[in-house]
């Protein structure tokens, strides 16, 4: 059975971003993000938020300017607060659990390219060239506070009850109950487990 380009994208395989279904998803995402960022009507904004995301929990707040690529790959739990100027490059699934706080200027990047420069571009059967991108999901569990100007890379899993210090670059999994920071981020100190 042949995979669709969308299925290839979510599986982290080489995919063709020109695929009409992917282009339609991208167009829908751009349209809804524009509504979210420009409308002053709260009901219209809430409808756009519900239509953009794959899943939206209760009491979700987008505070200020927000950007996403597809939108439909993003799932938000209850009591999620996303501050201004955050960017979700959701070329794979991004899942935020309950009570997640995202500070301003935070970026989530699901896509990556090969370290070997000779493997960054491919050639289609018609001879045209294309950029090769591989994707991986990002998961943030419950009760997480991500500080300002943090970057989270695809394939990362951030555990429960975690604080990510401002300016960190999260390139690998972070376990439950800790503060992590730095470039690349590492555990700085433990936190008491929540009861």
Image (cartoon, helix red, strand yellow):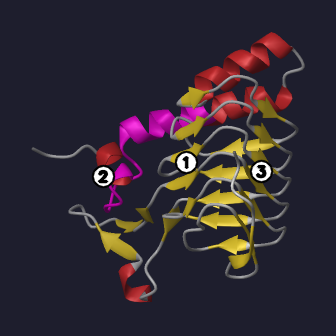
| Nearest to the observer: residue 17 or residue 116 | 116
- Give the Cα distance between marks 3 and 2: 26 Å
Q: What residue is at 60 percent from the left and 22 percent from the top?
A: 51
Tell me which numbered mark, 3 or 1, is placed earlier along the sequence: 3
Q: Secondary structure at mark 2?
A: helix
Determine which of the numbered discs, if any, sits on residue 94 in the image. 1
Q: Which mark is residue 8?
A: 2
Marks 3 and 2, the one that precedes in the sequence: 2
Q: Quadrant of residue 1?
A: top left
Quadrant in the rendering for residue 37: top right
| Label 1 neighbour load within 10 Å: few <14, some 14-19, many 20+ | many
CA gap between label 3 and label 1 equals 13 Å
**Which span is picked out in magenta?**
10-29
**Residue 10 horizontal/vertical position (percent):** 37, 50
Secondary structure beneath dot 1 equals: strand
* Inter-mark Cα distance, 1 to 2: 16 Å
Is 26 within the magenta? yes
Location of mark 3 (residue): 86
Location of residue 108 in the rendering, given as x and y in whole percent from the top left corner: 64, 58
Query: Neighbour class for label 3 at 10 Å: few (<14), some, many (≥20)?
Result: many
Q: Is residue 132 left or right of residue 163?
A: left
């Amino acid at each position: 059975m042949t995979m669709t380009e969308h299925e290839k994208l979510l599986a982290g395989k080489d995919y063709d971003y020109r695929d009409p279904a992917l282009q339609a998803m991208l167009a829908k995402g751009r349209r809804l993000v524009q509504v979210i960022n420009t409308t002053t009507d709260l009901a219209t904004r809430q409808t756009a938020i519900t239509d953009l995301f794959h899943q939206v929990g209760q009491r979700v707040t987008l505070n200020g300017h927000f950007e996403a690529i597809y939108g439909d790959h993003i799932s938000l739990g209850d009591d999620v607060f996303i501050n201004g100027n955050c960017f979700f490059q959701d070329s794979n699934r991004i899942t935020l659990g309950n009570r997640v706080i995202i500070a301003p200027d935070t970026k989530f990047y699901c896509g990556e390219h090969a370290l070997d420069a000779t493997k960054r571009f491919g050639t289609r059967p018609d001879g045209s060239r294309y950029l090769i991108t591989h994707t991986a999901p990002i998961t943030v569990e419950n009760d997480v506070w991500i500080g300002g100007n943090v970057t989270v890379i695809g394939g990362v899993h951030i555990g429960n009850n975690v604080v990510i210090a401002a300016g960190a670059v999260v390139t690998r999994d972070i376990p439950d109950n800790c503060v992590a920071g730095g470039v690349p981020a590492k555990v700085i100190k433990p936190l008491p487990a929540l009861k």
